[in-house]
Image (cartoon, rainbow, N blue to C red):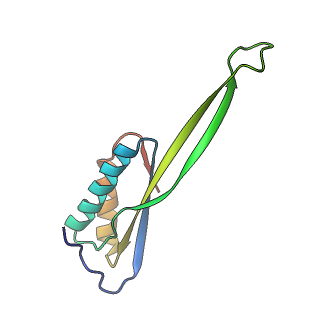
């Protein structure tokens, strides 16, 4: 689809999404972008932000066997959508729409 052109290029909002599963995040970020287009708001396609990796080490046994440990890692993927040149009423309506239809496991800022 052809993007809606920016009229003045004034940045109104940035929507940052975080998730642990990249497939859900890709689908939801594309859905948010297409819903912004359907509202008539000029928006950038979802940008990839650096992922964060958290490493957790726990002992396998509860007592004296400190050498036997397990490692777990948690990856957090991020996407960002920028919205330009729109009214506050349209932006508020779009944000409420995507919050009402959000997927589980995805947080938004």
Q: Residue at x 29, y 74 (%)?
A: 42
Farthest front residue in view:
67
Farthest bottom residue in view:
8
Image quadrant where one finds the N terminus:
bottom left
Does residue 37 sit above or below 23 in this rendering? below
Q: Nearer the viewer, residue 75 or 88?
A: 75
Q: Nearer the viewer, residue 47 or 91?
A: 47
Does residue 37 sit above or below 4 in this rendering? above
Does residue 37 sit above or below 97 in this rendering? below
Number of numbered tags placed on the structure image: 0
Q: Which image quarter: residue 80? A: bottom left
Q: Is residue 41 left or right of residue 15?
A: left
Q: Which image quarter: residue 68? A: top right
Instruction: Indicate the position of residue 60 as horizontal and vertical percent values.
Output: 68, 17
Q: Nearer the viewer, residue 86 or 17?
A: 17
Q: Which image quarter: residue 87? A: bottom left
Instruction: Indicate the position of residue 26 as horizontal and vertical percent values.
Output: 34, 51
Q: Residue at x 29, y 85 (%)?
A: 7
Instruction: Indicate the position of residue 109 as horizontal and vertical percent values.
Output: 47, 57
Instruction: Indicate the position of residue 3 as horizontal and vertical percent values.
Output: 24, 73
Q: Residue at x 42, y 70 (%)?
A: 13
Does residue 25 sit above or below 70 in this rendering? below
Q: Residue at x 28, y 69 (%)?
A: 90
């Amino acid at each position: 689809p052809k993007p809606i052109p920016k009229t003045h290029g004034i940045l109104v909002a940035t929507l940052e999404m975080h998730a642990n599963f990249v497939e859900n995040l890709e689908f939801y970020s594309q859905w948010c972008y297409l819903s912004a287009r359907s509202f008539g708001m000029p928006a950038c396609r979802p940008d990839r932000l650096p992922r964060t990796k958290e490493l957790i080490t726990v002992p396998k046994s509860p007592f004296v066997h400190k050498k036997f440990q397990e490692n777990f890692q948690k990856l957090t993927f991020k996407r960002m959508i920028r919205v330009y040149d729109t009214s506050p009423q349209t932006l508020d309506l779009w944000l409420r729409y995507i919050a009402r239809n959000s997927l589980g496991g995805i947080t938004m800022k």
